[in-house]
Image (spheres, rainbow, N blue to C red):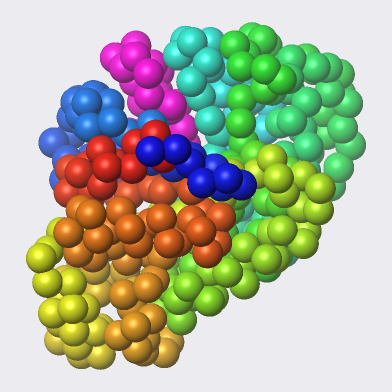
Amino acid sequence: MTTPEGLRPFKFAAAIEGNQHEGGVRRLIKNAQLAEEYGYDGVVVPDHLGNQAGPFAALGALAASTKKLRLGTSVLANPLRHPVVVAKEATTIDVLSGGRFELGIGAGWIKSEFDAAGIEFLSGPERLAQLEESLIVLDGLLRGQEVQFKGKYYQVDGIKGTPRPRQGPRPPIAVGGGGPKILKLAAKYADTVSIATRSTAGGKMLMSDFTLEATQRRVEIVKEAAGERFKDITLNWALAAVVLTDDRESIADMAISMLEQGEAAKNADFVDKIEVDRPLTKEEFLNSPYLAIGTAEEIADQLRKTRAETGLSFAGVFPTQMEAFSPVVEILKGE
């Protein structure tokens, strides 16, 4: 099946982690190889200071143990590393992987990690301003250029980006979020913009942002801020839940009930990710771009509708969803 005119082909990425819940760091390689077998376009590794592999070392291992997968970070916490250091690591991975690296980077958001490490956690506006400076520096260095930059947070005096990456003009950059400010920043600099939901200070996703209409509003923010370059931007989103079932209506009823119970259902992974700032109707729930519920064919149809209504074409899934979502990848591959 061909891609409808004016829409980007579907791409799919799976997040993978090397932690005790997934069999340790060595399991990370096996999970990436499985993703390749399932037909995913890429895998991404997160960047936190807890019990998981460091992103660049992990990607170096994956560059040697996979053949076609795109390899990315989702996402680097910018305040943890100077952009000159990030550029060096990024272009090295791009060379080692034969031009398969994609740099996902954000402002950092888990304050407790910064506090535990003794790293200053700046205010939200400061971290966004710091991220913008970093993106300017990275853009030049990832192109192999010599960079001169004098900002508030970074001062770079004539350093040249090396090694020269395999991809031209540079490896793609992904930035995203749920709030208007980060989305406008992403629209200005990123090749891929991730349309996320807003979240609480504790990292829970706000239920009100799950609706199709709220997602469309966030896409419009990107479109307006990007201007002419919007046509060159890939829109990405991550599925909060993947449930294969022959009875999506009943699953929706049960999930809505669990969300309303809150604490009574705290052991459910799906409920644990979400802050119910307002309940969704059943129709909103079933039409949400972030909730994939039904048979593989029903979910595939839902993603086609999401793409048609929003332009979102690059879907990501969490580590525990990779196998369950693979039949959908098989259906939509090439569309």
**Residue nearer the viewer, 40 or 101:** 40
Q: How many marks?
A: 0
**Residue nearer the viewer, 195 or 292:** 292
Q: Residue at x 51, y 59 (%)?
A: 308
Give the quadrant of the C terminus: top left
Is 138 situated left or right of 35 in this image? right
Q: Position of residue 292 (x, y in %)?
A: 29, 62
**Residue nearer the viewer, 46 or 168:** 168
Is 323 situated left or right of 84 in this image? left
Q: Position of residue 154 (x, y in %)?
A: 78, 38
> In the figure, residue 168 lies in which quadrant?
top right
Q: Position of residue 145 (x, y in %)?
A: 80, 17
**Residue nearer the viewer, 304 or 139:** 304
Q: Residue at x 49, y 10 (%)?
A: 98
Magenta segment boundaries in residue numbering: 51-73
Give the quadrant of the N terminus: top left
